[in-house]
Amino acid sequence: MARGDGKLTHDLDPLDRGPQDACGVFGVWAPGDEVAKLTYFGLYALQHRGQESAGIAVSDGHHILVMKDMGLVSQVFTEASLESLKGFVAIGHTRYSTTGSSSWENAQPTFRATATGHLALGHNGNLTNTAELAERVAALEEARGELPLGTKVSRATSDTDLISALIAAHPDLSMEAAAIEELPKLAGAYSLVFMDDTTLYAARDPLGIRPLVLGRLENGWVVASETAALDIVGAAFVREIEPGELVAMDEHGLRSHRFAEAEPKGCLFEYVYLARPDTSIAGRSVQATRVEIGRRLAREYPVEADLVIPVPESGRYAAIGYAQESGISFGEGLVKNAYVGRTFIQPSQTIRQLGIRLKLNPLREVIADQRLVVVDDSIVRGNTQRALVRMLREAGAREVHVRISSPPVKWPCFYGIDFASRAELIANGLSVEEIRTSIGADSLGYVSLEELTEATTLPADRLCRACFDGVYPVPVPEPEVIGKHLLEGLQMRAAQDTPSGSSLRR
């Protein structure tokens, strides 16, 4: 699809845009280490969380240099570019857009000059009071005599940019104090890494909806969206950044500030799909949780079959659990193209018609004449599963029983996952039996919300389950003041309201 910056990016699954990942953030404070390269490898470990753009900011104590572009981490950075990023504190970001279009202007980290130095910031999550914050930023800009909203040709339109603007707008406060002042005014989900010229900061919203962890290097500190990124750079896991906590790391050590009372509501979908299986959340291995979900799914929806196969890769561990509990053999019936991700090459109509085969291909010798249990993580629109069932039947499968390791997704996420709209969610309009008929499966079973919750070992009141039950822990504003392209709309209206030829100053 065409993106806002005029470049073309495409998912190689033209049939169904499933749940899109949240962003990934990484930060390191480590004098004497190659912090840019550490950040690169940290982002590489978090690539699954965002594939639209990537960026790294590095400071040598006097200046912050930001390098970012559209594309995967490996496409944006080279050995030579990383060598040019010298310093001892760095942050990095991999983006999937949930507020603001997919464009270079919205790639992160963001950058701002402040009264005392410089600020770079990366954000995983999504704010729900973006319109209110945009009004505050506009008022600040007007007071400073800056260009009106509608006249800036290459202005960022992300909630991240608003956070940066507000933290930078306190000439009488240190960065630390400014953050403590502004963070309580943000609503929604945010896990932040940011930096000034000498210090690394990390902060998490009071509900802790999106993950953020702290690690220790021999001579420094690391923060990351997932523990797997700590492992990649050789950092020892210390603890999670607590909900409602701001942490600062510099030559004086680590300082912690509580800016809001914690009310933990971690995202349940992290366990189902978003996080890497080799990550731990709240002390629980994601891989172990997914295997347990599969076991519970087998108990809830047993079936006579010959083979359990996963939809790679997100259905793998639930399929293993299903096979273990049911006693049905586990097998690899689908091969995934390991190199399919985002591409800047536009597929022709002929290639588009190949659909899911761009990503998955059946092993005919394995599945022919077999009664299959096919385990996947979720059904969003249903198009992918419909094509998959058809493909398996064409490859000779005698029966296809679909099992889903999450409950029906009936509600959109406003906290950092770009699901389809509620009207597009297949489970919102159809019963399970109607969905089964729609996708052409012999049977269909979803794990229940209660069993999924128990598999995490966390109590229900410590989890955000809004996409499954519609109970939003942070109130969601009216449609006119929320949405992915809210700020583009505000910018367009401001441009229309600016008289032709008028002064560029307010």
Image: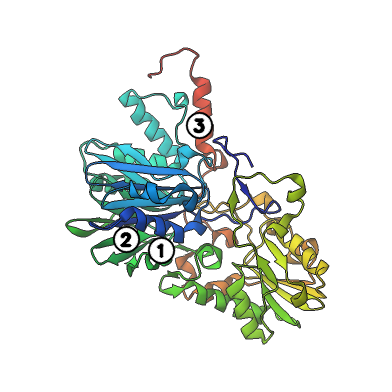
Q: Are marks 1 and 2 in contact (CB under 8 Å)?
A: yes
The earlier-in-sequence mark between 3 and 1 is 1
The N terminus is located in which quarter? top right
Q: Which residue is mark 2?
A: 222
68, 223: nearer the viewer: 68
Compared across the picture, whether 29 is left or right of 296 comes to left
**Outermost bottom residue:** 327
The percent coordinates of residue 291 (x first, y second) are 56, 77
Spatial CA distance of label 3 from label 1 is: 36 Å
Q: Which residue is mark 3?
A: 490
Rendered image: mark on residue 251: none
Q: Residue at x 81, y 69 (%)?
A: 393
Disc 3 packing (10 Å; few <14; some 14–19; many ≥20)? some
Q: Residue at x 48, y 65 (%)?
A: 463
Spatial CA distance of label 2 from label 3 is: 37 Å
Compared across the picture, whether 293 is left or right of 391 comes to left
Rendered image: mark on residue 229: 1
**Outermost front residue:** 80
The percent coordinates of residue 14 (x first, y second) are 69, 51
Considering the numbered disc 3 on the image, is that residue within a helix, a strand or a loop?
helix
The C terminus is located in which quarter? top left
Residue 438 drawn above or below residue 300:
above
Q: Amino acid at mark 2?
A: Val
The percent coordinates of residue 174 (x first, y second) are 21, 43
Report which quarter residue 162 is drawn in.
top left
Q: Amino acid at mark 3?
A: Leu
Considering the numbered disc 1 on the image, is that residue within a helix, a strand or a loop?
helix
**Outermost left residue:** 252
The earlier-in-sequence mark between 2 and 3 is 2
The earlier-in-sequence mark between 1 and 2 is 2
Disc 2 packing (10 Å; few <14; some 14–19; many ≥20)? many
Spatial CA distance of label 1 from label 2 is: 9 Å
